[in-house]
Structure formats: C-alpha cells, structure tokens
Amino acid sequence: MRVNPLIAFAINLAFPKPREQNVAVAEPELADSPVITMLKRKAGAVVVVLGRRESGKTVVAYRLAEGMGRKVYAVSPEQCPPPGVTELKMEQLEAEPPPFSTLVLDDLPVYASSHDYGDAFVKNLERMIPVVRHKRKLILIFCTQLASLADKYALDADVVIFKPPSLLYQDLERISVKKWQDSLAPIWEGKSDMWVKKHCFILSHSWKGLVSVDKPHSFTEEDRV
C-alpha cells in the first residue's frame, strides 16, 4: 500500500529516528588514545597513575611507556621490571636515564614516604621531578595508591590516570583528587576485577575519557595482568 507523502513527512516529524550519537561507541585502547599523541609531542612530561593495589596500575604504566616509542627504564622496589626494561637504582637517577627516555617509578612514592625527607633517596627524587620536561627530557610515569603520598611536583602532572581508589585510604586523599574519584565511581561500580584491570580513566588538559588497556608486549604469560 502506497503511503501519502504528506502523512510520511508528518510521521517523521513526530517520531524522528534516533541520532547516531546515542549509539554506544567502544572506548579507544590506551596506546591508540589521543593522550599518546599529545605526550609524543612533548620533550618531557609527568604522568601519575592512581589506584588501589592489584587494580592494574603497573600494566597501565608499561603499556603507556610502550606507546611512547622510547627506551624504557624503571625504579621498582617491590618487583622486577618486565623483559626489555632497564632497571635503575635510585642513586643512579642523578645521571640516568638519558634524555628522551621513559622512566617508570612503580609505587615509588609509597616507598619514598617511609624515608626521612633529609634522606638522599628522597632528595634525588625531589631534584629530578621539576626538570624532567625541559632539562632531562623524560616521560616520567608515577604509580601510586595515593596522590597525598606523592611529591608535590608529581601533582603538577600533564596526565592523571585513574583506577578505583583504595577504600581504606579515601579519607587520606587530597580533596581535589577525591572529587574526581567520587565522580568516576559509577564507572567501576558492578564491574569485575578483570574488567577493572583492563580499563582506566585518563584526565589531561586536552582530552579525558575511559580507555581499554591491552597487556604490554614486554609482559610474559607469567606476568600478572
């Protein structure tokens, strides 16, 4: 049966088709996200990865480091870095790593907080952070459970990456960080541990959003996801 064109036009006005933006779109993978493009343009930058233990912060750090396309170094007091990553001791940071490298500090702020502020360990860290962008030309990636345990210079970050916070530490967190964690809580609610490990929320001056996280190529089958 042929429909009168005037009637069809009226029906389309009354019941418009859903707009395309209502259709769910898969989140980008971390290595393909706009933040990688932004960081690659910089000589140096500070990235802070925040979240509770066993939420996948280390995977995020090394996947991000992999996307930079630079030689990767790490100071990791609690576990050995993956294959292909050069391990450094804290006392080596005065001269290492070389410019245009990526340095991962895995849970280092927690480790550093157990040292006295006059300790050479902490002084080395404090001296390095303010100069990574221009003088040292390093991409510096911090992993920590609490921003309140990180050095003040680390909080002047180019990128902050969120994982679910530790419930026991929430009252100790900085107010500005806690506001973001509270606003992101619905993202993690009801999700499995595996889903949480494979996703993170990125906040930067130029882009923010949820991304998925693939396992870094440098990780072996035995490495935890």
Image (cartoon, grey):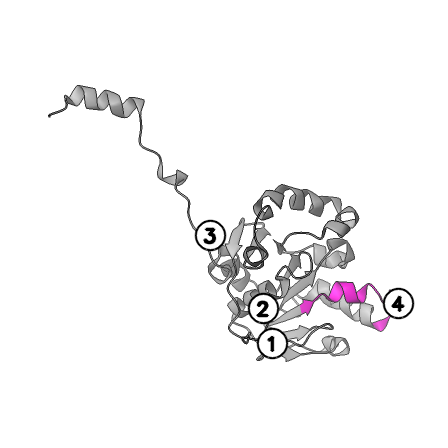
Residue 31, horizontal then vertical, whole percent: 49, 63
* Cα gap from disc 1 to disc 4, whole angstroms: 31 Å
167 shown above or below 45: above
* Up/down of 157 relative to 82, above or below: above
Report helix, strand or loop for mark 3. loop
Quadrant of the image containing the C terminus? bottom right
- Residue at the disc numbered 3: 27
Mark toward the start of the polypeptide (1 vs 2): 2
> Cβ–Cβ below 8 Å for labels 1 and 4?
no
Mark carried by residue 118: 4
151 left or right of 140? right
- Which residue does the numbered mark 1 point to in the structure image? 82
Give how far apart the Cα atoms at labels 2 and 3 are: 19 Å
Q: Which of the two discs, 2 and 4, labels the residue nearer the N terminus?
A: 2
Residue 116: in magenta span:
yes
- Depicted 91 relative to depicted 155: above or below: below
Find residue 96 and name its label: none
- Distance (Cα) linking label 1 and label 3: 27 Å
Q: Residues within 10 Å of mark 2 (few under 14, many from 20)?
A: many
For label 2, the residue is 62
Position of residue 5 in the picture relative to residue 175 (left or right): left
* Mark 3: few/some/many CA within 10 Å (<14, 14-19, 20+): few
Chain part drawn in magenta: 105-120
| Whole-percent x, y for residue 2 in the image | 11, 25
**Label 4 element class:** loop
Quarter location, residue 199? bottom right
Residue type highlighted by circle 4? Gly
* Of the image marks 4 and 3, the number of the one nearer the N terminus: 3
Question: Is any part of residue 126 visible from this angle?
Answer: no
Which circle's residue, 1 or 3, is located before the other in the chain?
Answer: 3
Mark 1 lies on a secondary structure that is loop
